[in-house]
Image (cartoon, rainbow, N blue to C red):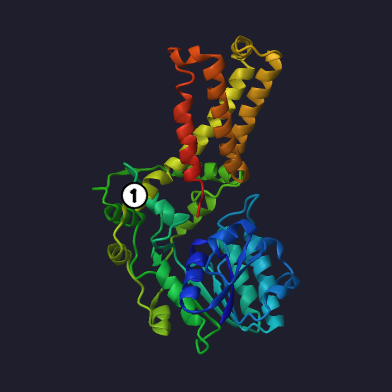
Amino acid sequence: MRVLLTGATGLIGGAVLAGLHGDGHEAVAVVRGTGATAQLPEAARCVALDIAEATSPGDWLPHLTDIVAVVNCAGVLQDSPRDSTAGVHTDGAAALFAACEQAGVRRVVQISAIGVDRGAATAFARSKLAGDEALTARNLEWVILRPSVVVGRRAYGGSALFRGLAASPLLPRVADTGPLQVVQLDDVVRTVLFFLKPDAPSRIVLDLAGPERLSLDEVLIAYRRWLGLGEARFVTVPGWLVGATCRLGDLIGLLGWRPPLRSTTRLESMRGAVGDPVPWMRLTGIEPQSLRAALAAEPASVQERWFARLYLVKPLALAMLALYWVATGLVALGPGWEDAVGLIQEAGFSAAAALAAAGATADIAIGVGIAVRRTAKPALRAALALSIAYVTLATFLLPGLWTDPLGPLMKVLPILVLTLVALAVLDDR
């Protein structure tokens, strides 16, 4: 069977893609940009298409030739310059469903979210619900799956945040967080494959929820034990601090990053993520795994511990590098101007003032580039190149800087290493 899969680079979509391949299906993977195709070796072919901009059935019809079924795993947490909840969950999805009806593609499996039909309080939930309604209005064999918080060996977003928080020396306790029935990624994939069978039922909506209700404390304790990090020590985090952190996440989102802690996370976590798994279990015969059982089945490796410990360090490293380069440039243009010009003159260059201004401007540009998601990688590479150039030139022209008590050149070396670390962990998924 040839299946069109949207959201193929996401947490759920990537796992579904592997499941389709393992079940012998051909997949046509829809990705936002051509750069993602290298991540999708299982796909029969890839289609570069921004779902938020594909809001007409005509945008989809050319890609539905010979397609037997569609699985829509596309999703974004919150609106930002990079993402549109309405565009992805509602407008683009509705156009896809209309195109399926026109092209005669009968089977559509939609990945929604648990609780969106119970008082949607966020743009994420409202747009997901609107997308579900657009699908149910079509004359199709539709299936809407509404998973709770999805966790598994693959990690992204909230599931990655659980690991990062669990690896912290002090675990946060947030009083008004609702209960969670986390569901395993493997169980979600098995469910999607079940509904792709020719004789599978359709025109149904199912909650995919784990077998137990857990508090956030219990989830973090389970992950900490899995990581082998000893007893958990909790510290109560006041609501105002959680809110401030989420608002900071919103600001970071304006730079193109997708931090898991944003206003949507806060509102959705207060509501919790629970549902009744019994209809799902009865219909499919799938017995959802508990969190503890799933973790026990796959012991944590040293790589898992690295990921968990680096998860919260990564944004700090990027923020410090951005601040370092911006601050270096501003100091050179401000209180350190005379010293900067003097060093360049001492090195034997003419037009010292122009060179000092150019160097400071380059530093600031690199810092701003690191702060913006789209330009972070080239900016980090530029930081490496410029740092090496500074050290090389100074070694030949101002070797005395190596023996300076303040170590201006010595301090560049750890910055180089930190930049290499930032490049190594830059990818989100």
Q: Amino acid at mark 1?
A: Arg
Structural crowding at the residue carrying mark 1, measured as other residues with C-alpha within 10 Å and reported as few (<14), some (14–19) or many (≥20) = some
Residue 285's spot in the image, x, y percent?
Answer: 38, 82
Viewer-proximal residue among 121 and 307: 307
Examine the rendered structure and indicate whether residue 407 appears above or below residue 295: above
Label 1, secondary structure: give it. Answer: helix
Query: For the point 56% across and 77% down, which residue is it?
Result: 26
**How many numbered marks, from 0 up?**
1
Examine the rendered structure and indicate whether residue 382 appears above or below residue 183: above
Examine the rendered structure and indicate whether residue 362 appears above or below residue 60: above
Residue 62's spot in the image, x, y percent?
Answer: 72, 74
Residue 290's spot in the image, x, y percent?
Answer: 32, 68
Q: Which residue is mark 1?
A: 305
Residue at the extreme bottom of the image, as rendered: 199
Examine the rendered structure and indicate whether residue 175 appears above or below residue 384: below
Viewer-proximal residue among 371 and 393: 393
Residue 147 seen in this snapshot: yes
Query: For the point 46% across and 35% down, which residue is it?
Result: 418
Viewer-proximal residue among 293 and 28: 28
Residue 113's spot in the image, x, y percent?
Answer: 51, 67
Residue at the extreme front of the image, as rendered: 396
Q: Is residue 9 left or right of residue 237?
A: right
Q: Is residue 330 left or right of residue 245?
A: right
Query: For the point 55% across and 68% down, which residue is it?
Result: 73
Viewer-proximal residue among 125 and 366: 366
Residue 33 seen in this snapshot: no
